[in-house]
Image: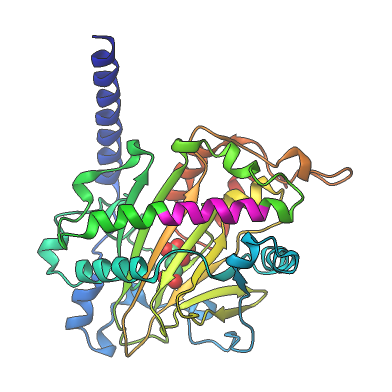
């Protein structure tokens, strides 16, 4: 009896939350947001709608793209073997870039290929089929466009499928595609491997800071830690010089794991005033540190702005996993990292509160982190 009562209260609560979200999205006026794969089929260069055309520094074709630099490559096998040099390289990568590619990460090539194939097959489905999993305006799960909140906002040349993976309470099974048939199974297997990789990486990141390896995992809430995936599909774009695939942003996660197509460059990482394109290393995964880690490390390691550009010739797919503390975790700089005489740069807050703030703000550089900064 007691558990049935608990269950129905939980269901009631979920139903109320859904209703609140529905009311919020009903109130949004976001104008027409096209499916960009459809738009690409119909649209010549001169017809790209004005809402996609960027101005000034926001344009991808600027002179501030730096082809000389490259984000570091870290060998996870070496880290596991206790390689001190590799740990030092990881520390430098975290301090200076906030981004690196990992090789020898232990995830089988076959699983990476399987996930890519399933995602590509999904995006290749007819629109009506994909719309069986709709993302509500202002929503964050399903197929559509996240982070669009007003009709005067610039739009990204990207279709997304975003899904909560864990804890179970954020999983919305109705939004998990049933076609291709192997999609869900593959995503479950893939997510377990990516999560294990996140644990390994966070343990080594902790070591680079002189912390016990279990520091981050220990405070992230175990089973309640949040894992979500977003698959971004960028069709070829007739004006890649004027349009962005994904607006500049930092991730709200602690750590992000990004899988991208071999040989297709699209991701760019902010380095001072320049943007550094990430050239995919075969079979590598791209790792970046998110806002949560910046807060926990009191800014020793920063989340770094990044964006995606499009190509006139080819499409591009990225499969992005966000790993973050449980929603009820209290965030704030770790006391060990607020050194004597050094100010505490971020306030304390509840991670769920930050998550809500993040997903209800448009992507705009590192602006969402103002939420936590002490000036
Ligand atoms: O597609 C990419 O390379 C970037 C994706 C990304 O930054 C994100 O989904 O947060
Ligand atoms: Fe990102």
The magenta-colored residue range is: 193-205
Instruction: Looking at the picture, tell me which residue is in the foreground, 166 or 58.
Output: 166
In the rendered image of this protein, does residue 52 appear above or below residue 228?
Answer: below
The answer to whether residue 312 of the structure is visible from this angle is yes
Q: Is residue 67 magenta?
A: no
In the rendered image of this protein, does residue 266 appear above or below residue 326?
Answer: below
Q: Quadrant of residue 124?
A: bottom left
> How was the colour assigned to the protein in this rendering?
rainbow
Instruction: Looking at the picture, tell me which residue is in the foreground, 2 or 248.
Output: 2
Q: Quadrant of residue 67?
A: bottom right
In the rendered image of this protein, does residue 354 appear above or below residue 2?
Answer: below
Q: Position of residue 181 (x, y in %)?
A: 15, 59
Query: Viewed as shown, does residue 245 lie left or right of 81?
Result: left
User: Which residue occupies the extreme top position in the image?
Assistant: 1
Query: Viewed as shown, does residue 102 lie left or right of 6?
Result: right
Q: Position of residue 199 (x, y in %)?
A: 54, 50
The answer to whether residue 246 of the structure is visible from this angle is no
Could you tell me which residue is drawn at 18 percent across and 82 percent down? 41
User: Looking at the magenta stretch, what is its main secondary structure?
Assistant: helix
Q: Quadrant of residue 26?
A: top left
Instruction: Looking at the picture, tell me which residue is in the foreground, 263 or 333.
Output: 263
Please identify the quadrant where the N terminus is shown. Answer: top left
In the rendered image of this protein, does residue 281 appear above or below residue 334?
Answer: below
Could you tell me which residue is drawn at 52 percent across and 42 percent down? 325
Number of on-image labels: 0
User: Which residue occupies the extreme front position in the image?
Assistant: 81
Q: Is residue 200 magenta?
A: yes
Q: Position of residue 17 (x, y in %)?
A: 30, 32
Could you tell me which residue is drawn at 74 percent across and 52 percent down? 209
């Amino acid at each position: 009896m007691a558990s049935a009562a608990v269950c129905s209260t939980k269901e009631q609560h979920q139903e109320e939350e859904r209703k609140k979200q529905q009311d919020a999205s009903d109130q949004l006026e976001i104008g027409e947001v096209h499916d960009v794969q459809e738009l690409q089929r119909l649209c010549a260069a001169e017809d790209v709608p004005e809402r996609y055309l960027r101005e000034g520094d926001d344009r991808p074709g600027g002179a501030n793209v730096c082809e000389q630099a490259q984000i570091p490559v870290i060998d996870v096998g070496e880290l596991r073997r206790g390689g001190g040099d590799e740990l030092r390289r990881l520390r430098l990568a975290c301090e200076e870039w906030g981004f690196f590619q990992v090789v020898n990460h232990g995830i089988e090539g076959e699983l990476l290929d399987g996930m890519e194939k399933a995602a590509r097959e999904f995006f290749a489905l007819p629109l009506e089929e994909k719309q069986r999993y709709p993302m509500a305006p202002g929503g964050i799960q399903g197929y559509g466009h996240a982070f669009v909140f007003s009709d005067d906002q610039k739009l990204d040349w990207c279709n997304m499928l975003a899904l909560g993976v864990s804890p179970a309470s954020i999983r919305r099974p109705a939004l998990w595609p049933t076609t291709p048939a192997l999609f869900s199974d593959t995503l479950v297997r893939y997510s377990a491997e990516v999560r294990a990789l996140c644990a390994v990486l966070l343990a080594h990141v902790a070591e680079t800071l002189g912390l016990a390896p279990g520091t981050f995992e220990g405070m992230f809430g175990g089973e309640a830690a949040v894992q979500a995936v977003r698959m971004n599909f960028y069709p070829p774009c007739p004006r890649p010089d004027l349009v962005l695939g994904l607006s500049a942003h930092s991730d709200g996660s602690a750590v992000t794991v990004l899988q991208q197509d071999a040989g297709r460059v699209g991701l760019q990482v902010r380095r001072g005033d320049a943007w550094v394109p990430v050239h995919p290393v075969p079979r590598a995964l791209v790792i970046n540190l998110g806002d949560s880690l910046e807060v926990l490390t009191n800014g020793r390691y920063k989340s770094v702005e990044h964006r995606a550009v499009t190509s006139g010739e080819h499409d591009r797919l990225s499969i992005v996993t966000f790993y973050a503390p449980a929603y009820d975790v209290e965030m704030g700089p770790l006391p060990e990292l607020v050194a004597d005489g050094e100010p505490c740069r971020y306030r304390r807050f509840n991670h769920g509160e930050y998550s809500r703030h993040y997903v209800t703000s448009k992507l705009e550089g590192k602006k969402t982190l103002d939420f936590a900064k002490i000036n």
